[in-house]
Amino acid sequence: MNSANPHPTAARGVARRIFLLAGILLLAGAAAGFVSLALAAKHYLKAEGTVTYSADRREYRHRRYTHNYDVRIAFPTPDYGTRHISMSPPIPLFLDKGDHVGLLYHPELLEDDVRYPGLETRLYIVLLIAGAGLAYLGRKSHNHTSKKEKTYY
C-alpha cells in the first residue's frame, strides 16, 4: 500500500466519475448544437458568403502576446443587397481572402444572427468524439485492480 495515497481505488473511482460526467456534458453540448443547427436550417435563409478580409495579427497587450484573428465576409441577400459581417473567433478558422463560406442568416436580424453550418458542424463533431472518449474512459471497468493476486506456496 502506498503511504501517500492509502486508497488508490477510491481515487480511481472519483476520476472515473469525473471523466463520465465530463463526457456526458460534452455529448449533451454536441447534441444541443446539432439540434440548434437543424432548427436554424429550417427557419433561416441560406447564402454563400465570400471572405473579403482575413488577418492573423500578433499583438503585445497587457504584458503578453496575443493573437487576433479577424475575418470579414460578404454575402448577397435578396432584399438588402450585399451584407457584410465581421467576426473575431478565438481560434484560427484558416479562412483566406476569396474563400467561400456557407452560412445561414435570419432575414430580420442580418448582422446579429448568422450561423456557419460547416464550421459549427466541425466543432460539434469534435465535442462528440471527445465526449464519447471521456464517457468510455469513465465507464471502463478496472477489474484488474480489484482482483487480488493468488499466492501459491
Image (cartoon, grey):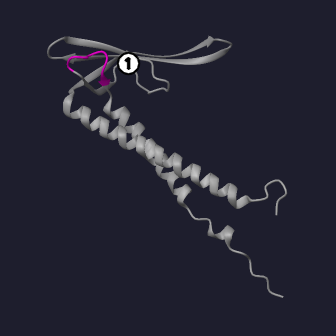
Quadrant of the image occupied by residue 98: top left
Identity of the residue drawn at 75% across and 81% down: 150
Q: Main secondary structure of the magenta part?
A: loop
Looking at this view, name the residue that lies furthest to the bottom: 153
Q: SS class of the residue under badge 1? A: loop
Looking at this view, name the residue that lies furthest to the left: 79
Q: Does the magenta stretch include residue 16?
A: no
Question: What quarter of the picture does the N terminus occupy?
Answer: bottom right
Q: Nearer the viewer, residue 150 or 94?
A: 150
Q: Is residue 109 magenta?
A: yes
Pointer 1: what residue?
97
Quadrant of the image occupied by residue 13: bottom right
Residue 39 screen position, x and y as percent = 25, 35
Question: What quarter of the picture does the C terminus occupy?
Answer: bottom right
Span shown in magenta? 107-114
Identity of the residue drawn at 14% across and 13% down: 79
Relative to 98, is 66 on the left or the right?
right
Identity of the residue drawn at 45% across and 42% down: 127
Say above or below: 150 vs 67: below
Q: Nearer the viewer, residue 26 or 55?
A: 26
Residue 120 screen position, x and y as percent = 37, 34
Q: Residues within 10 Å of mark 1 (few under 14, many from 20)?
A: some
Q: Which of 7 and 140 is in front in this view?
A: 7
Identity of the residue drawn at 58% across and 49% down: 18
Relative to 49, is 120 on the left or the right?
right
Residue 50 screen position, x and y as percent = 30, 20
Residue 27 screen position, x and y as percent = 43, 46
